Every structure is written in structure tokens, then in C-alpha cells.
Image: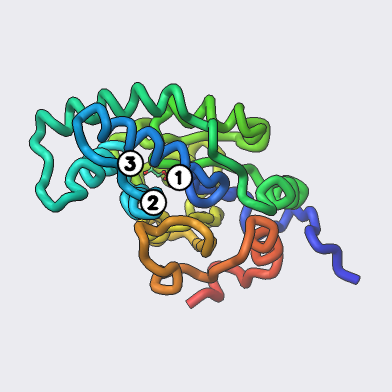
Amino acid sequence: MRPLYPACDTMQFPGILFDLDGTLLDTIPDLADAANAMRQDMGLAPIAEEIIATYVGKGVEQLVIRTLGHEGTPASVDMVMRGLARYQDHYRALNGQRSHLYPGVIAGLQAFREQGARLAVVTNKGAEFTGPLLRQKGLDGYFDAVVCGDTCERKKPDPMPLFHACDLLGISPSQALFIGDSINDALAARAAGMRVLALPYGYNEGRPVQTLPVDAIVDSIVAAARWATDAAPQTEHA
Ligand SMILES: O=C(O)COP(=O)(O)O
């Protein structure tokens, strides 16, 4: 019988890039707590977690702008600057407290490592929060590179951070597989010329993942590792 995760030197994807929020970790509880604490500081009523989940994906500035503009009136630049400072203070204290790993993440990361792949995180979350969160959740040992929302000049959906991750892993973008949950991941991967998988349990700014331009939707990181061993070579991919 064919092994489930064959380690091979002819491997299809020597590099696997992972989104963080909504892909490896459910971070919405902490993001929502920090966003609501910021709103309270600014005299605004709290918003439901499910709504805040639809504001996540394009980085902290957009989260603050969307959260402050929830009532329909765009926040002024001054309000956004004050909100950003308040939000960061709260998130610094809350980061990781109620966040948790999705099922199958550790087994999936191990499966990819057993395949011989080098792994990277490419997140729009800032470096100040990403490193501590990865360490707190026991994920830091799995990754050869971590590219954050403020590592490069541009964030996802721009492909720049994905190219940077490939450089750090020593692979070309066509050798990488991206795994994420949102339109920002799908567009960045496509622009980088990478194959891309979507997880259905993340946020995707509140829209169905079925609409994303991805190669496949897989249930878990374990299922992604299985998909990677079965994938047809890039040249055969339409
Ligand atoms: O910080 C965000 O907006 C989302 O971060 P992500 O790229 O890990 O999903």
C-alpha cells in the first residue's frame, strides 16, 4: 500500500506557506475583545464577534477602520490613529488568551514536515503579535520562516510577502503551495503564481469560501497534506 505521506526528494511542493488567523489559529475571540475594548475607550457600544470576524483579513489598520466605521460613518484620520493606539494596547494584553488551534493543525504540520517540506507563515498580523502568539500556541518550532504584515512594504493580497517567504525558504514561487482561508490569501497566491488551498472554517471577510479562486477547498491541514501528495505537477495544471 502507498504510504500516506511519502518523504521524497522529487516532492511536488518543497515549500508550504500558511496563513495564520483563520487557518492555523482561531484568533477571533482575542481580536474581538481588543476591538470592543477600543470601542469602549472611544465611547462606542460593543459589536458581536461574528461581525468583527468579517472585518479581519487585511491587517490591523483595516480592522480598526472597519470596526470604528461599523455604524456607517467612516472614522476620521484622527479617530483611526487614536483607535489604532488603543487597539494595539489592548491586543498586546489579550493576544492568545482565548485563541485556539484548529483541529488537525499539529498533525498536518507534522505530516508536511514528514514529507520533507520547509514551512513558512505569511500573515497580515504584525510581527509584535505574531512571534509571541506562535510561541504561546507551540507552533514556532514548525516554521523555517515567518513573514508578518509589517515585514514587507505591502501586505496580502499583494504577492510581495509570499515572494519574500519563498526567498527565505530558498524556493521559487512555483514550488510553493499556499494554504489560507480568505480572498487575501487566494489573490496573493494567484498573483505569485502559486497553487493555493482554502480552509472552510476561517473568516474570508464573511463571504463563502466556495467563491474563492483556489485549487481546492480542504477540511483541515491534515487533508491539505494529503492533497499535496496527490497533486498533479504544476505543468499539468490548467
Ligand atoms: O491580521 C489580519 O488581518 C489577518 O491575518 P492573517 O493574514 O493571518 O489572516
| 192 relative to 139, above or below | below
C-alpha span from label 2 to label 1 = 6 Å
Residue type at mark 2?
Ala
- Please say which color scheme the image uses: rainbow
Assess mark 3: CB under 8 A from ligand 1? yes
Dot 3 corresponds to which residue?
59
**Which of the two discs, 2 and 3, labels the residue nearer the N terminus?**
2
Residue type at mark 1?
Ile
C-alpha span from label 1 to label 3 = 13 Å
Residue 28 is marked as 1
Dot 2 corresponds to which residue?
53
Residue type at mark 3?
Gly
Residue at the location (81% across, 63% down)? 4
**Front-most of 209 and 15?**
209
Q: Quadrant of residue 10?
A: bottom right
Q: Is residue 44 visible to the viewer in this orientation of the structure?
A: yes
